[in-house]
Amino acid sequence: MERSGSRRLTDAFRKAWEEEHPQGSVVYRDLAAAPVPHLDAATVTAASVPPLREELIAEFEKADVVLIGAPMYNFTIPSTLKAWLDHVILAGRTFGPDVAPSGKRAVVASSRGGSYRPGTPRAGFEFDTNYLEKVLGDGLGLQVEVITRELTMAAVNPAMAELVPQAEESARQSLERAAESAREHAALLA
């Protein structure tokens, strides 16, 4: 996972966050190394909240800032991230007409092998950050910032060789923005 663009962004954010907010705590969940189970009908229809789901929701509710590493897999978020969201989204508690927006902030550190910006050939295939902005912002009432690193495959895909300078610039800018965002969010808590 050394090449992971989203991990590099979350690491940059976390490092700057801890420097600016040393009295805070960080709950780190590596959903690739320790995925949460996908929801099943029994969990969704249970009369009470199962312990793991309660733990995930409580972590989410306690967080000052929710930092999400979101690599694009096949045009969308990894299924492990979707499973985490499914556990955290609970009608009447974390979302719904009777749940007031928390005002909590979320930072999505996104990476993708190509570019899906408006005007690019694959712009219509952008289903990761669009999805997360809707779910986190409109669904859970969070203030969402997206930091995107593009063209992560340029250095290893010969067909993208001419895009290496743009990929390097995207990496530089996104890493700087991740650290700056962490400092800004920490300052809001000071």
Image (tube, grey):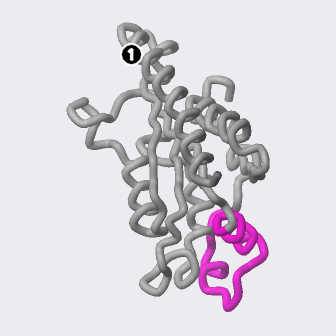
Vertical comparison of 24 with 44: above or below = above
In the image, 173 versus 111, the foreground residue is 173
144 displayed left or right of 27: left
Residue at (51% x, 46% y) in the render? 108
List the single residue furthest toward the left.
Answer: 119
Residue at (44% x, 62% y) in the render? 135
Q: Which residue, given by chain and number where applicable, does mark 1 sit on?
A: 166
Which residue type carries mark 1?
Answer: Gln
Give the x, y percent position of residue 56. Answer: 70, 66
96 displayed left or right of 10: left
60 falls in the magenta region: yes
List the single residue furthest toward the front.
Answer: 190
Q: In which quarter of the image is residue 89?
A: bottom right
Mark 1 element type: helix
Location of the N terminus by quadrant is top right
Q: Quadrant of residue 137?
A: bottom left
Residue at (41% x, 55% y) in the render? 133
List the single residue furthest toward the bottom.
Answer: 47
- Residue extent of the magenta highlight: 37-61
Give the x, y percent position of residue 25. Answer: 77, 52
Give the x, y percent position of residue 11. Answer: 66, 34
* Secondary structure that dominates the magenta span: helix
In the image, 92 versus 16, the foreground residue is 16
Q: How many labels does the image show?
A: 1
Label 1: few (<14), some or many (≥20) within 10 Å?
some
9 falls in the magenta region: no
In the image, 23 versus 172, the foreground residue is 23
Residue at (43% x, 47% y) in the render? 128
